[in-house]
Image: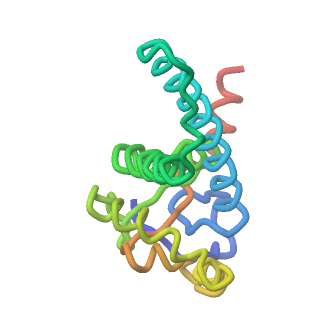
Amino acid sequence: MKATPARLALGSPARLEGHYAGMVTRFAAFVVDIALISVLFSIGGSVAEYILSLLLGDRVQLADSVLSSRLALAVWAFVYFAVPMSASGRTCGMGLVGLRVVRADGGDLGPGHVVIRVLALPLSFLLLGLGLALIVLRRDRRALHDLIAGSAVVYAWDARAARLRFLARQ
């Protein structure tokens, strides 16, 4: 899939597929991803505490160790972002709003680029989010972590075609 300029040409069909994703859509996907990371981490922690309590015969509270809890959350967040992005080019939140991560030239993002992108993601939030401001300031809507990893976020579905397919089934 070839990434194209962020602006649609006048008179072009109402397709967004392959166009650079804007700040609002990317933010919506990120909010969904953060919510899922939190919920799944809480459920996983509760299950782990229950299983460890049964095995050890004593009540286990994993949250008592702040350092290990934060480390476990960081590892879980890395896995949550890296695994689906390596497999399909998107996280659950991105899939929900119709986004996909590709290489800057429009090709599929390899696992190495995914690891770099996920590790560089926190850098975009440093200095009051100036790395994220690049999404608004750059024509290709690439944030700091996209520039570091050589990636771009594009729309990955054609709303008009989806609507026509839905109407055809009626």
Instruction: Indicate left or right for 128 with 141 as reference.
Output: right
User: Quick one: quadrant of the C terminus?
Assistant: top right
The x, y position of residue 1, in whole percent, is: 39, 59
* Applied colour scheme: rainbow
| Residue 109 shows in this picture | yes
The x, y position of residue 77, in whole percent, is: 50, 50
| Camera-side residue of 14 and 98 | 98
The x, y position of residue 105, in whole percent, is: 35, 72
Q: Is residue 30 above or below residue 123?
A: above
Residue that appears at 41% across and 66% down: 119
- Snapshot quadrant of residue 163: top right
| Residue 159 shows in this picture | no
Q: Is residue 51 above or below residue 114?
A: above
Count the labels in the image: 0
| Camera-side residue of 115 and 100 | 115
The x, y position of residue 147, in whole percent, is: 43, 79
Residue that appears at 28% across and 56% down: 111
| Camera-side residue of 169 and 35 | 35
| Camera-side residue of 154 and 43 | 43
Residue that appears at 47% across and 74% down: 145
Residue that appears at 55% across and 32% down: 45
Instruction: Indicate left or right for 18 with 35 as reference.
Output: left
Q: Is residue 48 above or below residue 150?
A: above
- Snapshot quadrant of residue 14: bottom right
